[in-house]
Image (cartoon, rainbow, N blue to C red):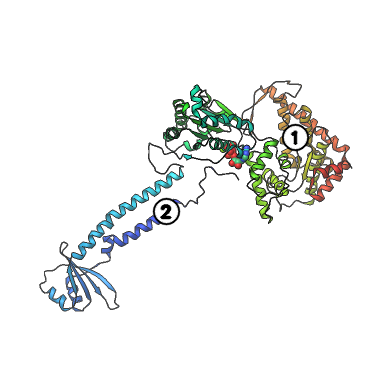
Amino acid sequence: MIENNQGDNRPKKSIIYYYFIILVAVMLLNALFFPSVMEARVKEVGYSDFITMVDENKVTEVVMDSTKQELVFSATDEDGKTTYYKTGAFPDEGLMQRLTDHNVKYSSETVKQNSSLLSVILTWLLPIFIFIGIGQLISKMMMKKMGGGPAMTFGKANAKIYAETETGVTFDDVAGEEESKDALTEIVDFLHNPDKYAQIGAKLPKGALLVGPPGTGKTLLAKAVAGEAKVPFFSISGSEFVEMFVGMGAAKVRDLFKQANEKAPCIVFIDEIDTIGKKRDSGNGMGGNDEREQTLNQLLTEMDGFDGRKGVVILAATNRPESLDPALLRPGRFDRRIPVELPDLNGREAILKVHARDVKMDSNIDFGAIARATSGASGAELANIVNEAALRAVRMGRNVVKQEDLEESVETVIAGYQRKNAVLSPYEKKVVAYHEIGHALVAAKQSNSAPVTKITIIPRTSGALGYTMQVEEGEKYLMSKEEAQNKIATLTGGRSAEELIFNTITTGASNDIEQATKLARAMITRYGMSREFDMVALETVNNQYLGGDTSLACSAETSSLIDKEVVATVKAGHEKAISILRENIDKLHELASYLLEKETITGEEFMEILNK
Ligand code: ADP
Ligand code: MG
Ligand code: ZN
């Protein structure tokens, strides 16, 4: 149920298709009305041949064109076909008599005059109209391609701005995100009665910036503010400002604010503002950012220029706030920052319920269980999970969504579709089973690790051949050093089992290795969990919301010391895992063969065998 804000879903026929139609139409009209074509079909004959044809009773009609000094006549040949001829006029006294004798109709140019007036219209005016039509069609198509307005006018941009009178979205549609909603209610109140604020002389912030990872409902919140306040909602995406022509983006900004001022009170929403609001210092030499810079400058000017008391509130959304130009964040511009974070346990449950409203659900659905299994999922992903569950119910021929549909779609959305037809050799399958039980066993035998809820060796399209799902019982915000060490041991548990049982190692642990290394590194460089470096920050996070890339902030010597420390940390975890598995090798065998048989086992089944 992810809605499509900008997409144009109508099927687009290619320009070539239109060109073809136009070409055919023009050719047809030409053939019908262009005299030159018509004349090409008129055969020219000598006067004496004309007389012969008259005598042979072939000629049916003659038209005399006195201006051109020629005769146009039609004649029927043996097989009854009519052909048009023309011949030069000849001073022939006896012609009229001859024509009357042979029963030939004759007239002088009157008929032709009429038809030539018509043909003037058809040959001159019609093509002009057609070409104007074609021109407009093409320009319309081009504007559509560029995401522009209905008409192509240079210099003045007609921004595609939606003045929706009612967005129809309210705060009830946004689940969780209570803090963000609280911060926005003041804006709603302000839009409801701007006079109340004006009387005291209070100025509300002109703009608020919604900041958070993708899919957390920023766009939805902005719409909900407009919906709650019942004011028009002007929405434009940052990328729509970036135009082909320099100056168009700035013109769009001007246009947008002009429209908004006329409709005040209202909300102007600029989605993905980072596309135009990037820091301006990054000179990349080519000067290709002129357009973006102009647009940004225009936006800043407009924001400074308009009267905040009129009731125009500007909301913007971004998932990379650190890349924004500081000028945008100055007081009087987007000085209010509203974090929109990934939902917590309760938030996830609430979001699932909001989206389940539109879907026929079984009466005893346990949303809490689904919420617990989806830690880290965004609102958009949760919406997708509900939709996938509904699709699965339809595939299964049911008319209500059941718990198992939701469970299955959690895996679909989070881990990729089940790869039913992937064939593993029995040996490989055995390796995978031991690997997964290795993870689970190491996790279970350490205190402070999240309980195992599911182990499966059914491959996913994401590439995983199996996985062990651990779900925290509640939300966790802090991780202790011991927990981090345990987690590293658990991550190395898969490989450790392979080593113990098969006395060999496979490529299967690559993801585990990556995760373990990342965590070990973060413990040392960011969390101050090593004795060597104490509480010194050795790395800084560049982008909190997108992947969290880090950059090193230390000397080369320190860097190599860090590497040594990372290796030592991972190694310690690995050794711990091996010794845990060695102590429990009977359980390892028992559980692995059980998993091999069942392919998927639940946390309870696992614990039951373990504690037997
Ligand atoms: P963003 O703009 O932050 O990337 P969107 O607002 O476009 O995210 O969210 C995409 C979709 O995800 C929404 O249309 C909605 O269906 C769903 N969604 C996201 N967050 C929530 C939420 N808190 N409550 C309900 N639905 C949500
Ligand atoms: Mg969005
Ligand atoms: Zn693994």
Task: Please report the residue visible at 49 percent of the width from the left and 40 percent of the height from the top.
Answer: 165
Q: Secondary structure at mark 1?
A: loop
Q: Which kind of residue does numbered mark 1 sit on?
A: Gly
Q: How many marks?
A: 2
Disc 1: which residue:
474
Q: Quadrant of ligand 1?
A: top right
Whether residue 68 sits left or right of residue 273 in the image: it is: left
Asked if the residue under mark 2 is in contact with the one under mark 1, i.e. CB atoms within 8 Å, the reply is no
Q: Residue 558 in the image: x percent, y percent?
A: 69, 22
Residue in front for this viewpoint, 105 or 95: 105
Q: Which kind of residue does numbered mark 2 sit on?
A: Tyr
Disc 2: which residue:
18
**What is the quadrant of the N terminus in the image?**
top right
**60 in relation to 422, above or below:** below
Residue in front for this viewpoint, 338 or 432: 338
Q: Residue 374 in the image: x percent, y percent?
A: 70, 40
Whether residue 123 sits left or right of residue 4 in the image: it is: left
Find residue 37 and report its image quarter. Answer: bottom left
**What is the quadrant of the C terminus in the image?**
top right
Task: Please report the residue visible at 45 percent of the width from the left and 35 percent of the height from the top.
Answer: 263
Which numbered disc, 1 or 2, marks the residue that appears first in the sequence? 2
The answer to whether mark 2 is within 8 Å of ligand 2 is no
Residue in front for this viewpoint, 370 or 200: 200
